[in-house]
Image (tube, rainbow, N blue to C red):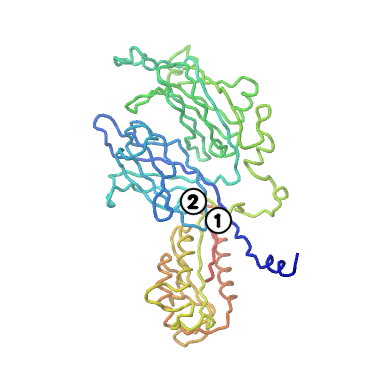
Amino acid sequence: MSAGSERRAAAAPRAVPAPRASRVELRLSCRHLLDRDPLTKSDPSVLLLLRSQNQWVQVDRTEVVRSSLHPVFSKVFTLDYYFEEVQKLRFEVYDTRGPSDLGYQDDDFLGGMECTLGQIVAQKKVTRALLLRFGRNAGKSTITVTAEDISGNNGYVELSFRARKLDDKDQAQPLPLLQDLFSKSDPFLELYRVNDDGSEQLVYRTEVVKDNLSPVWEPFKVSLNNLCSCEETRPLKCLVWDHDSRGKHDFIGEFSTTFEEMQKAFGEDQAQWDCVNAKYRQKKRNYKNSGVVILADLKGSLFPGLHHGRLSDSLHRECTGPSTPAESGRPAHPGCNSEPGPGPGADVQKWVAIDFTASNGDPRNSCSLHYINPFQPNEYLQALVAVGEICQDYDSDKRFSALGFGARIPPKYEVSHDFAINFNPEDDECEGIQGVVEAYRNCLPRVQLYGPTNVAPVISKVARMAAAEKSTGEASAQSPQKPQSAASCPVIS
């Protein structure tokens, strides 16, 4: 290779690494939806849209929950989450007239809600009012979106259930309807995960099998994070219902298990459970069950597989991550996350420090980074808004501590490398990023750009405040009064 070609090769631009994405799962439920059906209740589904290139693009849609004003959807939305981007989402709820895959143009709009993915991740659980066209409230309707980080959890499992000799709820009614005299139960199954606080999270809802007491439900695939939070011993509950077109489903029975038990029983060809109705057990002396539910198939995917009905070691590492710092190749750190950005539920406190040294140039000169242009924001304002709009989603109070350095400040015009740009040393916080912008605009004409560039005082102050926040957070973490976490995020412009 010649010297010239070597120089050209050396001068070739380096590839910019693509942003790293986290993976999050979103679960949806609604309350108090509007009832658009004159004879029955609404049949809601939710449409998810993402803002891209100044237009809304359809991403996915939930299943239709028939005849329900308080639906809990089993469909899980899986999205790539970029901490450094503002990802605007819109959720639209419709009363569905036909199959959900035929579009929504003919469906009745029940309300919508807009937010960013960052807001959902930061708060972990977001409940908002649904709005109709022109911003009107859709009665008392609300939508709740819950986020769960599944980054690094690449394990999936495919399950297939069937049942045998389920109770015939149609014939068990005191006064059965005419159509029920010639039909049988229309069973469907719901699988729930029991959370640490005792609440139950819907994992999956099967389709309805019409007129069948020994139904075979379609196989379904779920992430291990969704199924059991990657904990094989976490309790699971299965409920079997007789579907009712009016939404008043009849309870057939239930059973409890764990994923660990599922694997062991399936490996030993004994994967079946009595479907029990506790009310019948109390009333009937010789009651045994209301049928039997059988795990017909269990398959692993996107990982090395299942061995003898148990998770392989490689799958367990895939799902839960390294068990020790030595295995992971990095030192242990509280709250350490292999993916960028804060995890779900994190509360981030933010500081902004602005360089007011004379090296930026005279603000009256168009070449200055602080140039006061009445028609468009200068480069400092552009940077503040670009970074601040992303960061503020991760702070519950949306307040920024805004500092400046390298300027002579009133009233004595002495050089300061640590001053509040709102000139209130007792409270240097601003309301949201727009509050920082306003404080900067008011501050710039009142200070004299000077020097030198000395960032150390600001960094020291932020470090002290972050340490105080950390100690306060550790103290509050031991108290049930305030469980949220605290972190620091200094931004130097």
Say left or right for 138 vs 461. Answer: left
Outermost residue to the bottom: 412
Say left or right for 374 vs 23. Answer: left
Residue name at image x 45 percent, y 37 percent? 75
x then y, percent, for residue 190: 46, 29
Q: How many marks?
A: 2
x then y, percent, for residue 98: 34, 32
Outermost residue to the left: 38
x then y, percent, for residue 47: 39, 42
Image mark for residue 341: 1
What quarter of the picture does the N terminus occupy? bottom right
Image mark for residue 121: 2
Position above or below: 269 against 424? above
Q: Are marks 2 and 1 in contact (CB under 8 Å)?
A: yes
Q: Residues within 10 Å of mark 1 (few under 14, many from 20)?
A: some
Q: Residues within 10 Å of mark 2 (few under 14, many from 20)?
A: many
Disc 2 residue type?
Val
Please name whichever residue, 126 or 287, is drawn nearer the observer in this view of the structure.
Answer: 126
Query: Tag 2, which secondary structure?
Result: helix
User: Considering only order in the chain, which callout, 1 or 2, is on the residue closer to the N terminus?
Assistant: 2
Residue name at image x 42 percent, y 82 percent? 445
Say left or right for 38 vs 358. Answer: left
Please name whichever residue, 137 or 488, is drawn nearer the observer in this view of the structure.
Answer: 137
Disc 1 residue type?
Gly
Position above or below: 335 against 358? above
x then y, percent, for residue 201: 48, 37
Residue name at image x 71 percent, y 66 percent? 5
Query: Tag 1, which secondary structure?
Result: loop
Position above or below: 343 against 231? below
